[in-house]
Amino acid sequence: MNNESGAAKLKAMVEESRYIVFFGGAGVSTESGIPDFRSADGLFRKVDNRRVSPEEILSRDFFRRHPEDFYSFYSSSLIHTDARPNAAHLALAELEKQGKLKAVITQNIDGLHGLAGSRNVLELHGSVQRNYCMECREPYPLSIIVESKGAVPRCTLCGGVIKPDVVLYQESLDMALLESAANYIAKADMLIVAGTSLSVQPAAGLVRLYRGDRLVLINKTPTPMDRYADLLLNEKVGQALGPFLPQKDV
Ligand code: NAD
């Protein structure tokens, strides 16, 4: 489908819908300057003379065994204090304000949906904004990680290692949050899935719970769910959702 007819179809679908749910991944934030993992090869690291993937570095085992290498990667690749919401984040906040969009479900940990003004955001993988001491559970803001400049941040009360409140590989997701996400998707009359390769579970499983006939998939590259989409847009998320940005006062 060309961009023009795709845009018109998306607009018509949004107009007809009353309970839109959005499900997104790292591709939603690339236009804010935060790289995803699958598009870029540059996020691989050398540890003990071995080429290590971002997924391995962001695992529970790796965090325990190599906290220094974990934080060196995490601070440089996943912390982007200058990143600002892009057209996609802002358009979704506007659709929520209009009462059309009921929930944003995200695999991202960057907090940009909240910064854009979205209120009902289900952060399945947690957030870089929240951190806590693994020994005494003292909570810490993002600034403790930024100020550590890639070194392992330590609790100022007990000296324990501080861990970001993000779900690492090998860790389980918050079940109540997952159930809530599943309920939103099952109730949706339109599901917009964007900027996700749908290769990390439970993403693909959640999308399968959608029962309506307005499944929109916006992704630059093919995904395993493309054939189920009622509307498939192989373009940038910000470009596809740009028309839903707030109208400027005239
Ligand atoms: P992913 O599996 O969700 O893949 C990203 C997808 O988005 C790719 O298919 C890519 O082609 C597409 N894409 C990239 N930019 C796009 C754009 N502007 N418009 C449309 N499509 C675009 O994500 P991943 O990068 O493999 O990351 C896996 C996990 O790592 C995520 O679930 C997340 O927890 C974490 N992560 C988070 C962030 C973040 O918070 N911003 C960034 C990187 C990774």
Image (tube, rainbow, N blue to C red):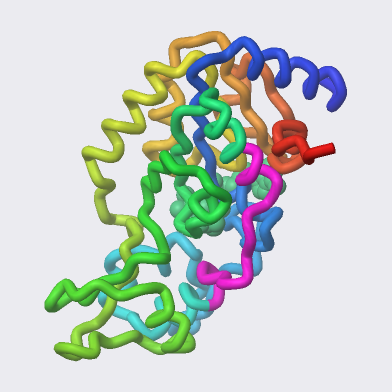
Q: Could you tell me residue 239's position as x and y percent?
A: 77, 39
In the picture, the quarter occupied by the N terminus is: top right
Instruction: Choose between 97 and 186: the one closer to the eye.
Output: 97
Instruction: Choose between 53 and 250: the one closer to the eye.
Output: 250
In magenta segment, residue 231? no
Q: Visible in this render: residue 125?
A: yes
Residue ID at (71%, 32%): 244
Residue 250 drawn above or below residue 148: above
Relative to residue 3, is residue 229 drawn left or right? left
Residue ID at (76%, 35%): 247
Q: Which residues are magenta?
A: 76-91
Q: Quadrant of residue 186?
A: top left
Residue 161 drawn above or below residue 10: below
Q: Could you tell me residue 212's position as x and y percent?
A: 49, 10
Q: Visible in this render: residue 234?
A: no
Relative to residue 111, is residue 234 drawn left or right? right
Q: Could you tell me residue 150's position as x and y percent?
A: 46, 85
Residue ID at (15%, 88%): 158
In the picture, the quarter occupied by the C terminus is: top right
Residue ID at (43%, 21%): 208
Residue 225 drawn above or below residue 69: above
Relative to residue 30, is residue 249 drawn left or right? right
Instruction: Choose between 219 and 123: the one closer to the eye.
Output: 123
